[in-house]
Image (cartoon, helix red, strand yellow):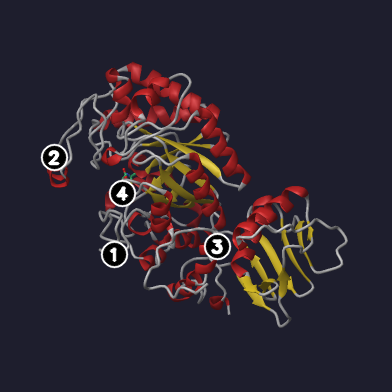
Amino acid sequence: MTATLPLVPLPRSVSPSDGAPFLLAARTPLIAESDAAAAARRILSAATAQTLDLPTDPLPSSPAITLTHTSDIGPSGAYRLRSAVGGLEISAADAPGLAAGLHTLTQLLEPVTDGWEVPALLIADTPRFAYRGLMLDVARHFFPVDDVCAVIDRAASLKLTHLHLHLTDDQAWRLELQAHPALTDAASASAVGGDPGGFYTREDYERIVAYAADRHLTVVPEIDLPGHTHAVGLAYPHLAADPVVTPQLAAEAAARGEALPAAGTPYTGLGVGFSSLRLDDEATFDFVADVLGELARLTPGPYLHLGGDEAFGTAPEEYDAFLSRVTQLVADLGKVPITWHDAGRADVAPETIGQYWGLTTPDSEAAEAAQAFVHRAGGVILSPADAVYLDMKYDDDTPRGLTWANGPTSVRRAYEWEPASLVDGITDDDIVGVEAAVWTETIDDLVGLDAMMFPRLAAAAEAAWSAPLGSDPDRSWESFRRRVGGLGPLWRRQGIAFHPDGRIPWAKG
Ligand code: TNX
């Protein structure tokens, strides 16, 4: 039964009932507290591409939508939804749970002449992992605040909880800081391919954080250190080491017809791993402490991401000492540090969370680095690159995208992996969550983001929310492709320019 309803991520339990469907119309009464009522009007209006009044009426004479708080449902995000001809009720212990139930409701809507039908059923649903993330790279290409807000809406609709913003890289520095305006003055105008740049003012950043919070998402800002820092050298030449141009980097740049990185010149190519801050100079540590201090004050969420990936231009002992010191600094600021798994080999602060970006079949180095976070206290966020790096091409014909993560990533490959079977010894208790990542070397607008994210972000959301792969007949590729295909009409109404993948039976409408 579930397989015929377009529900993604797959709920824990769906029990159809025999009765007639509930009818949602613009004037359906709503019984809810004011915040929940506002969320319901916003979510359901977006999903129907129609302004729904849903007047609040404590004693309605016609079938109503009721949103109620109950304490017997947990954890955060869990909800129950009961639909019958006489009324539709969503109950949850918290606002994220009510919102999750409302997003499920959007997936059940079937257009009819006088409104939208919802089949009679009972859903009891609860998330598997508390951290369900999406990373957006705003450094390689810049995305205006409105696009970031659109991405937040998309993430919220799949019940994600965290938006990780990759704010800095070799190509640019995108966040204005009061103590260091030189960073955005000197290093925000560029982007990959010489495309236009941009940056977020502190007010822009606060707007993004607030917009996300309204939709129950926490922003996780990343300042990538000590590599991926060529842009810092445009503002502060004395803090940046000279680019390390390996024969491989030079050959790849030549093959793409790109200029090599040069100190003091904006970098617009696709190369990685050539830059480093100067770690033999205390001035670098003062700078990093300043930047992270200001970022911590700007960020209400508990996490700061420090990058730590691909620092091939940094001597290993210096890298280890830097990561150890800077993760401790973040902990002292009262935040939980997150790093890419590369930092697992360093003696990082014990609560540091490692973000695994190796393949679904890990090599021993990546596996050991990830396991190190579990042996300390932090645990891991899983972002296997050949499954949830949404900047990979779907197939050889995809116009945008890269292929380094084991070739193109089909929707099926994005779907068919199981978090607890990824890295030896890392099981549910060690997994903080799952995060999809969209790097933007080849993506420069919202239409491009949509095409690369959808439908694969839905597969990542299911890995993060639903029970383990194979634990239920519907937690399978065959069921997923039918369920996700049924979301085509909803996504079109929501203005999502999804990739019409040929292996998915897309519903008309
Ligand atoms: C690897 S994953 C990177 C990024 C690139 C991405 C492109 C990781 C931690 N680093 O710098 O943008 O691949 O797919």
Label ID, residue 250: 2
Q: Earlier in the sequence, mark 2 or mark 1?
A: 2
Which is more foreground, mark 3 or mark 1? 3
Which is more foreground, mark 3 or mark 4? 3
At 42% from the left and 20% from the top, the residue drawn is 180
Q: Secondary structure at mark 4?
A: loop
Which residue lies under the disc numbered 1?
395
Q: Earlier in the sequence, mark 3 or mark 4?
A: 4
Tell me where residue 315 appears, x and y as whole percent: 23, 30
Tell me where residue 140 appears, x and y as whole percent: 34, 40
Q: Earlier in the sequence, mark 2 or mark 4?
A: 2
Q: Secondary structure at mark 2?
A: helix
Q: Secondary structure at mark 1?
A: loop
Q: Earlier in the sequence, mark 2 or mark 3?
A: 2
Q: Are marks 1 and 4 in contact (CB under 8 Å)?
A: no
Which is more foreground, mark 2 or mark 4? 4
Gap between marks 3 and 1, in whole Å?
26 Å
At 60% from the left and 39% from the top, the residue drawn is 210
Which residue lies under the disc numbered 4?
442
Q: In the image, what residue type sits under mark 1?
A: Asp
Q: Is mark 4 within 8 Å of ligand 1?
A: no
Q: In the image, what residue type sits under mark 3?
A: Arg
Gap between marks 3 and 4, in whole Å?
26 Å
Q: Earlier in the sequence, mark 1 or mark 4?
A: 1
Which is more foreground, mark 1 or mark 4? 4
Gap between marks 2 and 4, in whole Å?
20 Å
Looking at the image, in which quadrant does ligand 1 appear? top left
Image quarter (top left, top right, bottom left or bottom right) of the N terminus: bottom right
Which residue lies under the disc numbered 3?
493
Dot 1, crowdedness within 10 Å: few (<14), some or many (≥20)? some
Dot 3, crowdedness within 10 Å: few (<14), some or many (≥20)? some
